[in-house]
Image (tube, helix red, strand yellow):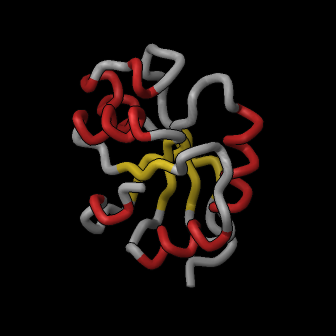
Amino acid sequence: MGLDQIDGAEAVAIVEGPFDLLSMATAGVPAVALLGKDVSRRQAVKLQRAGVRTAVMAFDSDAAGAQKEAAQILREVVNVATIGDYGAPDPGDATSEALKEAFGRRKAVYFAATMG
């Protein structure tokens, strides 16, 4: 959800649900929502084809295990980073300013196995 709204952004936040996506959009952060915690290789390839070079993981704080699994799949085709602290347990609960600043402080954790 939201792939058509990322406007060729090279770095895109990966969130779980529509409220997280709305919060990111309000903050001016390009994002897509998985509508859950799972990501498929097909979704990763779609991100790559849309011009995304870095997927910035921004799952809810209670989803660390799922975020790591999703990152392992995404890193097959795009770089993976984690978002900085945004002062809330869920992106949907954070302020726009906090999300924008946290996105700017993202840290690379995996580099893509292939960028082709």
Eyeballing the image, is 70 above or below 104? below
Q: Which residue is pictured at 63% across the width and 61% down the height?
A: 74
Which quadrant holds the N terminus? bottom left
* Percent x, y of residue 66: 72, 41
* Percent x, y of residue 112: 63, 67
Closer to the camera in the image, 91 or 10: 91
Eyeballing the image, is 105 above or below 38? above
Which quadrant holds the C terminus? bottom right
* Percent x, y of residue 94: 37, 19
* Percent x, y of residue 72: 73, 56
Is residue 72 found left or right of 48 in the rendered image?
A: right
Is residue 43 found left or right of 99 in the rendered image?
A: right
Eyeballing the image, is 77 above or below 71? below
Q: Write down the quadrant of residue 26 in the picture.
A: top left
Q: Which residue is pictured at 48% across the width and 59% down the height?
A: 54
Q: Which residue is pictured at 44% across the width and 27% down the height?
A: 91
